[in-house]
Image (tube, coloured by chain):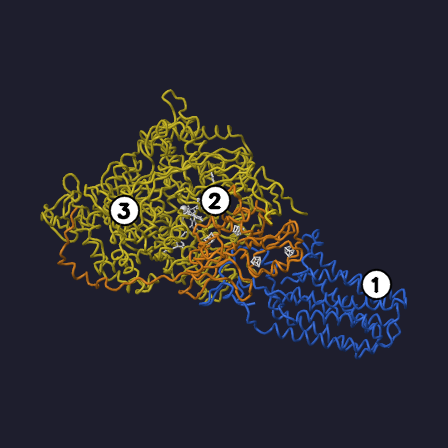
Chain colours: A orange, B blue, C yellow
């Protein structure tokens, strides 16, 4: 099994709902809490597992704005795991989820250096590295209604731009949407083989505008033959 | 990358320590200029151990959760950081046996002494290499992801070690020509390697760009918003940037303080104590500058997501 | 491995359903509580509004609940301290309520109009409106006047429902969707859900917006229009459609007044009014009978085009002939508007043709039988799947009313309203055009002490007689709504209240009561000066303020609270009973009528009271008839009791669900004592799903209209004829022209405004302020946008949300900036005719070249909202509001006129023009600067350096 997310860049409006839902769930999740620094002060910041960036492609007026959520990609070849000296970072054999054992981590930051996708953040208060858990504490929780056994970010996304599933199973919804829409991985050249995929912007098909009559109604209007419409 | 003092000190100091020990052993083995008196060997050896120890302890300061530091040896099989720790630890017993026997001077145990020394030296080299590989293995940082990095660590470690050895030898009433030549030889090697390295990172990398990072291949890609007003762990840890000007000046310092001045002093100033100490000191300053730049110039690919066009 | 993965502590947890309050979208939420602490807030999958999803604000509700800015106790301005100094003493509720009862009692017994009660973007206008009516003051309104009344008024005077909350696009069937000037809207989650659906189905999404962020980011086509030009663009589209005869004959003849006949006698009384029979029915020309017939009858064949001579000899023309004549004029040809709109002629032409293609060649046919109002059965519902939505990009301009009418005109021409794939009505809409509800304007009733108004203060004037003015034509309302200056101000003009009350124009008031609106900061124009007005003393009455007594009802430490004489602290949304009523702004969806409740989920930890409770309490103490028994005792124990038992008309109350003795009835029925319990059992919402036969064409759908009449949505079951040509507007115009036999303005300015802006057909004119400032001196349009993750001023107190957006920048087109030598993070001066601000700028591609914009309401006054005085919201964030004047630039021989739409009084936020210059080196930080608010009595001002919120007990920091 290879669990991960598929993110649809064609419909992501950059609303940050997923980022907040993630923060909210994980504030009391398995690696809870997620410390906030200077929460009321000049420069508030904190530990987040999912951040939304926005980019602009092309130049005015042919520019396109693309919102770009990023969380852990749960890579197949996750150097963040291999470089970890303590074994705190590990990738689960059964489902490919990459986690950090808070009881083992010594807070050396080394794994975060090895992560190309900025998915790992040190919690200075606990002194440990934290990251997206793929909501491992939701998706397997039998006490949660089956249709809600999904990552918090996926459940909440108002634009349904986030999908969760098994990318090993060619029959899964995520696998087929990746096939159909040409889903891609980020920075494949680094060879991490990320599990998360991104769906590119759709190309709208042109709407025919021929055979919609010719201009010139203005002249017709004088002696126009009214149509009989009964009411 | 953010140049953390603890890490700079750690690499410079332990690098010098391992270099010093390895050279000490070789000198001892081949009895350069008739070899060093026992006291000098001990001084050099202990100095090496202290430098290594100091380095390792300072690296602890960079841990956010040191109480788990002991676990760092557990991932020997995959992690260069772990390996470095393990080898560094393994180095000590052999190094101590070697120095102990050197101190006791027991001819019947000479073989043991030399084997222990040999093993310790081997471990010193491996550890130095590992330190280099901690950085060298990161695909995320082009400026590090190269064999030049461990090569640099080895060369600079031995160069600074050689200088220290010379300084120690200076008090040994022994002929210094050999030691000086050794220093100069290593200096040339280290300097050329560093030069090659600087040329190499200056060349535009063919690696990741903002386009491969985002997958937007058509048209220019510009960052509109990082998604958070103020700094995050990512900007604090990876956002560091040096002005090109400053890094150029610093590079000249690296070469002047690190190599040119020491070379001049040693060739001109001869073997006067203060000359040698001066050489050691400026060289070490040069090393620190070199190490600071090593981090400061490293551009992690995460910066692509924060607007950098390439890294 | 799972071993080390901690799983929820379900035994300690409890799940409850209620309604989100973080914005006016009012989504259903599922709240997980762990030992009276909030563990998790998620969307309710069964809720019609959000169907399980939740936005950032909603999910961040936790951090609102635990905000450091929460008020804790009633506050009285410290005796001897100056208003606005923010020095308060805590008082008990009894004292506060007695003080207020006495004061309001006196006002009510003498001159009820001296109480002005204005409420913000609240979700309880049905109650506050009833309260004001019972008190007897006409001076009540909610925020609609500065929000989006242009959309409501334009819709309700044209099609019977409207953008804003009274309709929604049909995402299931739409194939072409145009969004005019929307960044977020109230329908926040539904739009996001819908856009994804539309795109998944292969529909095309076009966004008309000077800025490309948010929704516009995912648009298939972005049209960077110049601000204020939408009306012109829309009318040019109309031009293209007409010029190719691309309009829906059936729809126009059956469902609109296009065939009605207009008297064409320029310069004479009665010109431009409909030709009517004795009974007042509009007449049309019957092509078969060859005679004039009642245009409302069935079995008629009205002529859509034509000039005729009325029996009385007057020349008459059909509305359609007038329409065609006006918009076929070359003035509206794409080539002739392209420059002004900043949109290429080809694009305008293509837009129009694409709409027509989808509407007429890609129709949707559903096998649904329905019956029209004339009894004719149809076996199909035909949809012309073009949907539109528009909001403040159009509304917040002084030409927004007509611009919005122009958009509705396109919809009517395409026959694309309330059908499959169209913009569709949300119950209780559609209503008659306009709704049959007139504002109270009987002087005797208004002045009568201790007497309720005979009807609510707000309504929809049909003619000059309906204005709320005295015999001399002076306004009777403090905001001058329904006066000659602003005749159709259907939501009042909240943005004028403080200015008018301070100037004692039209008269002085005694008490201003503000609920849930930060009028001292982001919801007011001209913020800095308005703060001074609030401080202003009355020279006539030494020691007294121009606005003598200011009551602020808030839940948090806002900038407004700082100016209060009396602060009544409210509860949070998780702590109180509340209703989202069909009598109010509905949460219905096109396919279901719906309402919802809130009820307390967590225990109160402070001495605060729900405003709902306080209103009922005050109403009882002041003995409002509706709240008092014949014997003088109070009628309702408390708010929940009021909700259950109050009936506006027999069987119709605040909540439509589970009515009837045993909760067996929906929409209408006797009170049900167990109604609250029923709602709570049913996840806190009620939805009545319309049967297929009642889902479409409801303006003329007999089955639907019968039900609507039965349950009181509308007066009686009769077709709702859409008004392309608006006779009420024409009546006001005649008054301006001196041709109306009835009240007419005696002031020249008013006459000119009526004559010019009360055109019965949609028109475009240059926004008023822009017509008065020099475009060369002030070359840029300046706008704000809603950030999707922040709600106006009150999300900066949210420690999670503010990490995302703690400082706003002024955004400018990158090429434009380069030409001006400006770059990212430069500090700039931005200057308007009203003042200047200093702020930091950013460049981007996605901004129209003549436009600059920033995020709304991010700038804060230091010390407010529980933040430290050095919060970047206060030191670097800024408000655009300082630049926006509530009055138009002065003009020779004219009294100062409100900076609003001349028809509706909608605040013209986006008419602003500015000039921009780089700040001098060293000039940094936002300007103007404001003194930091003082901490409130219970607050030592200290704030922790880290926050580690969690419901997990076993999470101690490891060091
Ligand atoms: N997240 C969030 N949601 C909210 C709110 C909030 O504060 N935050 N506020 C709520 C309230 S009170 C309201 S009234 C609604 C308002 O909802 P919106 O109408 O979406 O509010 P604005 O952000 O003012 O959006 C105005 C949009 O019109 C564009 N615009 C400006 N001028 C023009 C123009 O002349 N023509 C065109 N075509 N576009 C133009 C702007 O670029 C902007 O995108 O949102 C509600 N929902
Ligand atoms: N420049 C510019 N200015 C604008 C706009 C714009 O687009 N541009 N938009 C305008 C529009 S459309 C609107 S609607 C206004 C909105 O502006 P406001 O009406 O001021 O809305 P908020 O900023 O949300 O402030 C509402 C107040 O209600 C308080 N509050 C929050 N929750 C509760 C509660 O449960 N009970 C009580 N009693 N009080 C509560 C908050 O603390 C806050 O003080 O802004 C207007 N101002
Ligand atoms: S919630 Fe969905 S739409 Fe919003 S930012 Fe996240 S992915 Fe994009
Ligand atoms: S995204 Fe980063 S943290 Fe996640 S698995 Fe890949 S490398 Fe590791
Ligand atoms: S920070 Fe923790 S998880 Fe990351 S490498 Fe160091 S020990 Fe491993
Ligand atoms: S999967 Fe869970 S942890 Fe990962 S980003 Fe989504 S919400 Fe956060
Ligand atoms: S849109 Fe967001 S804030 Fe508004 S009600 Fe829905 S969830 Fe709450
Ligand atoms: Mo609003």
Q: Is mark 2 within 8 Å of ligand 6?
A: no
Task: Judge depth for marks 2 and 3 and give the one in front.
Answer: 2
Horizontal placement of C494 versus A124: left or right?
A: left
Vertical relation: B9 (above or below) C791 = below
Q: Which residue is denoted by mark 2 in the rendering?
A: A146
Tell me the quarter of the picture where residue C587 sits: top left
Q: In the image, is C780 to the left or to the right of A215? A: right
Query: Which residue is at the far bottom?
Result: B268
**Looking at this view, is C360 or C429 the one in front?**
C360
Asked whether residue C686 is in view, the answer is yes
Quick check: C604 left or right of B292?
Answer: left
Between residue C897 and residue B145, name the one nearer to us. Answer: B145
| Residue pointed to by mark 1 | B97
Query: Residue C248, image x and y in percent?
Result: 22, 53
Q: Is residue B277 visible?
A: no
| Image x and y of residue C886, in percent | 40, 48
Of C512 and C499, nearer the camera is C512
Q: Dot 3 surroundings within 10 Å: few (below 14), some, or many (20 or more)?
A: many
| Residue C10, quarter of picture | top right
State the SS at label 1. helix
Cα–Cα gap, marks 1 and 2: 64 Å
Q: Where is residue C517 drawn, in percent x and y?
A: 45, 42
Q: Which mark is residue C159?
A: 3
Element assignment for label 3: loop
Residue at mark 2 to residue at mark 3: CA–CA distance: 44 Å
Q: Nearer the viewer, mark 1 or mark 3?
A: 1
On the image, the x and y values in percent for residue B39 come to: 88, 67
Which chain hosts label 2? A
The chain to which mark 3 is attached is C
Are the residues flagged by discs 1 and 2 from a single subunit? no
Label 1 CB-ligand 5 distance < 8 A: no
Q: Find out whether the residues at labels 1 and 3 contact each other: C-beta distance under 8 Å.
A: no
């Amino acid at each position: 099994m290879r669990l991960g997310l598929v993110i649809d860049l064609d419909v992501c409006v950059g609303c940050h709902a997923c980022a907040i839902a993630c923060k909210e769930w994980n504030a009391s999740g398995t690696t809870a809490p997620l410390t906030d620094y200077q929460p009321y002060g000049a420069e508030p910041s904190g530990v987040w597992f999912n951040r939304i960036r926005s980019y602009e492609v092309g130049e005015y007026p042919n520019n396109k704005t693309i919102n770009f959520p990023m969380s852990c990609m749960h890579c197949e070849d996750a150097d963040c795991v291999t470089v970890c000296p303590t074994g705190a970072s590990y990738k689960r054999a059964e489902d490919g989820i990459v986690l950090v054992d808070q009881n083992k981590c010594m807070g050396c930051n080394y794994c975060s250096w090895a992560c190309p996708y900025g998915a790992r953040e040190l919690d200075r208060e606990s002194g440990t590295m934290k990251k997206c858990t793929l909501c491992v504490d939701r998706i397997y929780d039998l006490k949660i209604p089956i249709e809600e056994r999904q990552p918090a970010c996926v459940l909440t996304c108002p634009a349904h731009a986030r999908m969760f599933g098994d990318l090993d199973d060619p029959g899964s919804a995520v696998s087929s949407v990746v096939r159909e829409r040409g889903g891609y991985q980020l920075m494949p050249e680094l060879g991490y083989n990320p599990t998360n995929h991104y769906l590119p912007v759709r190309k709208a098909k042109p709407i025919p505008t021929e055979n919609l009559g010719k201009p010139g109604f203005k002249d017709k209007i004088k002696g126009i033959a009214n149509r009989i419409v009964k009411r | 990358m953010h140049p953390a003092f603890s890490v700079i000190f750690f690499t410079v100091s332990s690098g010098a320590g391992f270099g010093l020990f390895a050279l000490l052993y070789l000198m001892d083995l081949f009895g350069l200029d008739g070899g060093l008196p026992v006291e000098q060997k001990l001084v050099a050896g202990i100095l090496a151990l202290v430098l290594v120890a100091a380095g390792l302890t300072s690296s602890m300061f960079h841990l956010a959760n040191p109480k788990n530091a002991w676990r760092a040896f557990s991932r020997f099989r995959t992690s260069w950081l772990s390996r470095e720790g393990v080898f560094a630890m393994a180095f000590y017993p052999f190094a101590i046996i070697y120095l102990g026997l050197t101190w006791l001077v027991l001819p019947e145990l000479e073989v043991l002494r030399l084997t222990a020394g040999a093993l310790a030296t081997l471990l010193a080299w491996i550890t130095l290499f590992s330190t280099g590989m901690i950085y060298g293995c990161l695909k995320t940082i082009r400026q590090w992801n190269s064999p030049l990095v461990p090569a640099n660590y080895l060369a600079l470690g031995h160069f600074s070690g050689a200088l220290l050895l010379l300084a120690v030898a200076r008090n040994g009433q022994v002929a210094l020509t050999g030691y000086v030549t050794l220093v100069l030889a290593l200096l040339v090697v280290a300097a050329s390697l560093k030069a090659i390295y600087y040329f190499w990172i200056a060349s535009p990398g063919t690696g990741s760009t903002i386009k491969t990072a985002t997958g937007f291949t058509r048209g220019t890609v510009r960052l509109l918003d990082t998604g958070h007003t103020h700094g995050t762990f990512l900007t604090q840890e990876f956002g560091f940037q040096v002005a090109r000007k400053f890094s150029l000046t610093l590079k000249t310092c690296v070469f002047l303080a690190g190599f040119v001045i020491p070379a001049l002093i040693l060739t001109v100033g001869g073997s006067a104590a203060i000359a040698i100490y001066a050489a050691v000191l400026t060289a070490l300053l040069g090393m620190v500058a070199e190490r600071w730049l090593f981090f400061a110039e490293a551009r992690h690919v995460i910066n692509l997501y924060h607007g950098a066009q390439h890294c | 491995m799972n071993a080390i993965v901690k799983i929820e502590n379900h035994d300690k947890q409890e799940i409850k359903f209620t309604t989100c309050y973080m914005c006016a979208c009012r989504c259903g939420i599922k709240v997980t509580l762990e030992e009276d602490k909030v563990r998790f807030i998620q969307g309710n999958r069964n809720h019609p509004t959000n169907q399980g999803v939740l936005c950032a604000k909603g999910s961040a509700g936790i951090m609102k609940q635990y905000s450091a800015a929460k008020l804790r106790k009633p506050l009285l301005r410290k005796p001897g301290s100056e208003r606005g100094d923010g020095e308060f003493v805590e008082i008990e509720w009894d004292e506060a309520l007695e003080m207020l009862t006495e004061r309001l009692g006196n006002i009510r017994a003498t001159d009820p109009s001296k109480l002005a009660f204005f409420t913000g973007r609240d979700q309880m206008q049905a109650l506050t409106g009833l309260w004001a009516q019972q008190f007897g003051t006409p001076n009540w309104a909610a925020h609609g006047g500065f929000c989006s009344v242009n959309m409501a008024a334009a819709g309700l005077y044209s099609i019977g429902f409207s953008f804003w909350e009274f309709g929604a696009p049909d995402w299931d069937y739409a194939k072409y969707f145009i969004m005019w000037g929307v960044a977020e809207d109230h329908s926040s989650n539904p739009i996001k859900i819908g856009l994804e659906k539309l795109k998944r189905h292969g529909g095309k999404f076009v966004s008309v917006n000077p800025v490309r962020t948010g929704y516009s980011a995912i648009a298939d086509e972005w049209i960077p229009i110049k601000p204020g030009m939408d009306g012109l663009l829309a009318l040019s589209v109309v031009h293209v459609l007409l010029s190719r005869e691309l309009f829906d004959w059936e729809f126009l003849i059956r469902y609109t007044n296009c065939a009605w006949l207009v008297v064409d006698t320029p310069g004479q009384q009665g010109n431009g009014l409909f030709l009517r029979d004795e009974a007042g029915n509009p007449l049309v020309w019957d092509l078969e009978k060859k005679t004039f017939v009642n245009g409302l009858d069935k079995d008629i064949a009205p002529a859509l085009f034509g000039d005729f001579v009325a029996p009385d000899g007057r020349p008459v023309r059909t509305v359609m002939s007038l329409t065609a004549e006006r918009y076929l004029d070359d003035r509206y040809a794409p080539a002739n508007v392209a420059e002004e709109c900043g949109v290429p002629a080809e694009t305008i032409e293509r837009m129009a043709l694409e709409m027509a293609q989808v509407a007429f060649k890609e129709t949707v046919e559903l096998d649904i039988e329905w019956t029209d109002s004339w009894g004719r059965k149809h076996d199909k519902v035909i949809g012309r799947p073009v949907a539109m939505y528009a909001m403040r990009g159009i509304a917040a301009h002084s030409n927004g009313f007509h611009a919005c009418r122009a958009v509705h005109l396109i919809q009517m021409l395409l026959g694309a309203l309330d059908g499959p794939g169209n913009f569709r009505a949300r119950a209780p809409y559609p209503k008659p055009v306009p709704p049959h509800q007139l504002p109270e304007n009987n002087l005797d009733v208004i002045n009568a002490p201790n007497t309720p108004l005979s009807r609510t203060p707000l309504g929809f004037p049909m003619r000059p007689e309906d204005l709320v003015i005295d015999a001399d034509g002076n306004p009777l309302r403090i905001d001058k709504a329904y006066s000659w200056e602003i005749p159709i101000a259907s939501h009042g003009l909240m943005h004028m209240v403080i200015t008018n009350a301070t100037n004692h124009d039209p008269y002085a008031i005694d008490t201003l009561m503000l609920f849930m609106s930060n009028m001292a900061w982001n919801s007011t124009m001209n913020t800095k000066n308005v703060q001074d007005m609030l401080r202003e003393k009355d020279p006539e009455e030494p020691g007294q303020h121009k606005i003598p007594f200011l009551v602020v009802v808030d839940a948090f430490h806002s900038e407004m609270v700082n100016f209060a004489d009396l602060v009544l602290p409210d509860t949070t949304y998780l702590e109180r009973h509340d209703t989202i009523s069909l009598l109010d702004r509905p949460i219905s969806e096109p396919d279901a009528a719906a309402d919802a409740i809130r009820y307390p989920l967590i225990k109160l930890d402070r001495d605060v009271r729900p405003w709902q409770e306080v209103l009922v309490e005050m109403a009882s103490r002041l003995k409002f008839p509706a709240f008092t028994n014949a014997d003088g005792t109070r009628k309702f124990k408390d708010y929940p009791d009021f909700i259950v038992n109050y009936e506006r008309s027999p069987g119709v109350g605040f909540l439509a669900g589970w009515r009837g003795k045993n909760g067996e009835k929906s929409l209408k029925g006797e009170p049900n004592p167990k109604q609250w319990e029923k709602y709570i059992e049913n996840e806190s919402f009620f939805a009545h799903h319309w049967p297929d036969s009642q889902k479409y064409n409801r303006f003329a759908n007999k089955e639907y209209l019968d039900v609507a009449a039965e349950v009181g949505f509308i007066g009686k079951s009769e077709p709702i004829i859409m008004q392309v040509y608006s006779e009420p507007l024409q009546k006001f115009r005649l008054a301006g022209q001196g041709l109306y036999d009835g009240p007419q303005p005696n002031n020249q300015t008013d006459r000119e405004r009526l004559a010019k802006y009360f055109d019965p057909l949609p028109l475009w004119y240059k926004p008023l302020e822009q017509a008065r400032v020099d475009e060369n001196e002030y070359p840029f349009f300046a706008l704000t946008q809603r950030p999707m993750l922040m709600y106006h001023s009150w999300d900066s107190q949210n420690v999670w949300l503010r990490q995302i957006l703690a400082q706003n920048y002024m955004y400018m087109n990158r090429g434009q900036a380069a030409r001006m030598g400006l770059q990212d993070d430069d500090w700039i001066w931005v200057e308007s005719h009203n003042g200047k601000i200093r702020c930091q700028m950013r460049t981007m591609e996605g901004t129209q070249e003549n436009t600059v914009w920033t995020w709304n309401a991010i700038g804060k006054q230091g010390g407010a909202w529980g933040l430290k005085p050095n919060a970047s919201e206060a030191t670097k964030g800024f408000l655009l509001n300082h630049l926006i004047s509530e009055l138009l630039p002065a003009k020779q021989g004219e009294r100062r006129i409100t900076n609003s739409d001349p028809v509706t009084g909608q605040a013209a936020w986006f008419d602003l023009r500015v000039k921009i210059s780089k700040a001098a080196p060293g000039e940094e930080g936002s300007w103007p600067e404001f003194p930091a608010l003082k901490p409130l009595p219970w607050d030592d001002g200290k704030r922790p350096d880290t926050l580690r919120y969690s419901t997990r007990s076993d999470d101690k920091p490891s060091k």
